[in-house]
Image (tube, grey):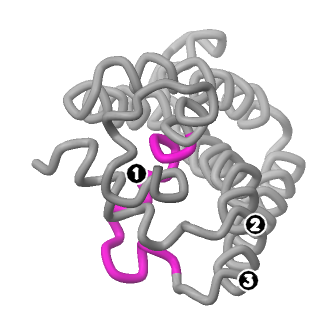
Amino acid sequence: MKTLKEQMHSYAAYHRDPRNKLAHFVGVPLVTFALLLLLGWFRFAPAPDLPLTAATIFYVVVFVYYLCLDRQVALLQAPFTLALLFLADWVARLPFAESAAVFGATMIGGWAIQLAGHAIEGKRPALADNVMQIFNAPLFLTVEVMFLLGFRKDLAAGGLAGER
């Protein structure tokens, strides 16, 4: 498995323009929410208030992967994805037509915003070359915020945060 620094360097190569990065700060959470909503429709718990869903299982697996890459970044990123997970679970329990409409709007809107960012930058999305890059997007955003706050400069070498 590649290190976090290697993963971020690879992802950053497709995301240098600040407008593209800004588009991802909006689009990535929307797509993440939509994916968690879709997976939230598959419930395994006998009690409706217990959110044991495919989304919960997916989140745990991805979180363990993030922990393996970098514990500090994973723990800083976790509250944001957990908030999306709980919101997605709430929306997944709405009547299906309403839930599906929210899914469609967030999935299409999130991808449209990110693709617009890539059009501005003039580069195709990282996942066009490696679909696994989709898992690095939330970590990339977290690392970018850490750079803005003056932390984790050890990850900056190699192309992150404007070649710091």
Residue 47 or residue 2, whichever sits in front: 2
| Principal secondary structure, stretch drawn in magenta | helix
Q: Return the residue at label 1.
A: 135
Name which residue lies at 78% across and 55% down: 100
**From this viewpoint, which residue is outermost toward the front?**
164
The numbered mark at residue 120 is 3
Residue 63 or residue 18, whichever sits in front: 18
First of labels 1, 2 by sequence position: 2
Q: Residues within 10 Å of mark 3 (few under 14, many from 20)?
A: some
First of labels 1, 3 by sequence position: 3
The span picked out in magenta is 125-141
Name which residue lies at 56% across and 67% down: 16
Residue 161, given in percent of the width and then of the height, sits at 52, 51
* Whether residue 139 is situated above or below residue 16 in the rendered picture: above
Residue 78 in the figure: left or right of residue 48: left
Circle 1: residue type: Phe
| Real-space Cα separation, disc 1 to disc 3, in angstroms | 22 Å
First of labels 3, 2 by sequence position: 2
Q: Are marks 3 and 2 in contact (CB under 8 Å)?
A: yes
